[in-house]
Amino acid sequence: MGHLPDITAVQPADTALTLKWVGMEHIALPIHIPISSSQVQQTHAQADVFVSLDSKQAKGIHMSRLYQILNQHLSNKAMTPHRIEHLLRELISSQQGLSHSAKLQLSFELILEKKALISDKSGYQGYPVTLHCEYHQGQFTIELGLSIPYSSTCPCSAALSRQALSDAIACKFTDDAIDKNTLLNWLSSEQGSIATPHSQRSFAYIHMQMQGHTLGYISDLIIEFEAVIATAVQTAVKREDEQAFAKLNAENLLFCEDAARRIKQALQYKPRLLGYWFKVEHHMPITQSSLTINGCQRWNKQRCIDVTAYCLRAADTQFMVCYIFHIPVNIIHDSIKLSSKYTGATLWLVKNKYFCR
């Protein structure tokens, strides 16, 4: 076979400019996730791998080397912070001076076994996880993203249900003295089901920035935040478990704000965090809307501009439409035009400022 041409090695760039990130996305990758000192879980991930192109004259990076190095370091191997840092440094050195930074994003589902609340049953639950790892100017950082589902019972709805039951008892039992057994039998019958407070499937999306080597076990963090929220969804349930779950929800009535404050307090007391961002969603069963709260602290402002809950009023409806944008700084030059097909409104983001027309 004759000599194969290498265009990137012999041709200069048409335009002498650096590029923030160049790489590959949606790479299938089998990995092993440590979930304890003695357990490793095999799973598959979607991997995105990038390096910076810091040479203005270079036509492009050595793309195939990214794929080869990724497989060499992580395929069917235990995913540890030390291994990831070594991978990122190897990605940079493989470009022979073209790159000074590297990043890796892994998206996968972690499967954890969960015991029932009361019975001896157990089941398995999947948790979406993202890991955003960067090596830049000698600093190795990791951003861990978790999605945790839970149940939330509305305190207002619970109060209204209690009031409805109180009114029904007053109407049913008009005498000054009420026979205890008669009352208990009535409460246990279908007639005693006067009103039930509404509960909703809810979600906590938690992102934490940390120095790479302080990651720890992802499974421990999931268990910790489920304990903080207190009403995590269950897997296998018998009747006694279902009743215990109902009691657990009654003991932990949650407005969206309550859940957000529990999570924020837990994050504020976590050592070694560089910053965090979280979002809670309560999917209301009584309306089509969802209740949403965002929170953050020391979030890396160089990575994104966060235009949060920017409201535009549609011309043909009374409802407000809320937008949350996380716009990478490196794609902003002069302005970005964001149009909404639902409202007909346009949002312009111009050098960190935004306005609507």
Image (cartoon, rainbow, N blue to C red):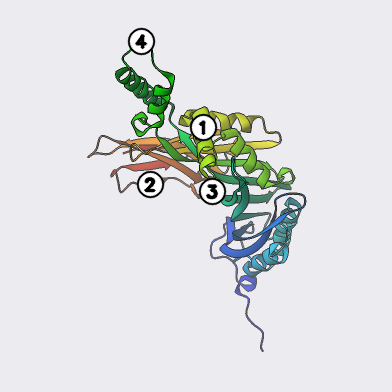
Res. 9 image quadrant: bottom right
Q: Earlier in the sequence, mark 4 or mark 2?
A: 4
Residue 328 percent across, percent down from the top left: 52, 47
Q: CA distance from mark 1 to mark 3?
A: 50 Å
Q: Would residue 173 appear left or right of 335 to someone viewing this image? A: left
Q: CA distance from mark 4 to mark 1?
A: 30 Å
Q: Which residue is mark 3?
A: 330
Could you tell me which residue is drawn at 68 percent across and 49 percent down? 136
Q: Residues within 10 Å of mark 2 (few under 14, many from 20)?
A: few
Q: Secondary structure at mark 1?
A: helix
Residue 122 percent across, percent down from the top left: 60, 49
Residue 135 percent across, percent down from the top left: 69, 50
Could you tell me which residue is drawn at 47 percent across and 35 percent down? 152
**Image height check: is 121 above or below 167?**
below
The residue type indicated by label 4 comes to Asp
Q: CA distance from mark 2 to mark 1?
A: 46 Å
Residue 338, numbered circle: 2
